[in-house]
Image (cartoon, helix red, strand yellow):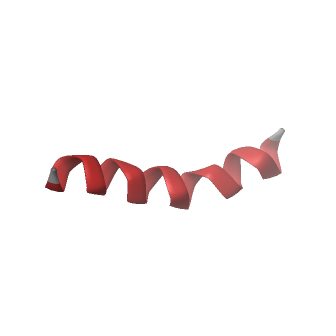
Amino acid sequence: LFGLLLIFTQTSVVAPFIYTLF
């Protein structure tokens, strides 16, 4: 459960950069 939360947090942080690149 903790690992899933960590992945979700990283995705939320990385998502804006992906939208900026594309």
Residue placed furthest toward the top: 22
Quadrant hosting residue 2: bottom left
Q: Is residue 20 left or right of residue 8?
A: right
Relative to 19, does residue 6 appear above or below in the rendering?
A: below
- Looking at the rendered structure, the number of numbered marks drawn on it comes to 0
Q: Residue at x 70, y 45 (%)?
A: 18
Q: Nearer the viewer, residue 19 or 3?
A: 3
Q: Nearer the viewer, residue 12 or 20?
A: 12
Q: Name the image quarter holding the C terminus.
A: top right
Q: Residue at x 49, y 50 (%)?
A: 11
Q: Is residue 8 left or right of residue 1?
A: right
In percent of width and height, residue 12 lies at 53, 57
Q: Nearer the viewer, residue 7 or 17?
A: 7
Residue placed furthest toward the front: 1
Relative to 13, does residue 4 appear above or below in the rendering?
A: above
In percent of width and height, residue 5 lies at 28, 56
Q: Residue at x 62, y 50 (%)?
A: 15
Q: Is residue 15 left or right of residue 5?
A: right
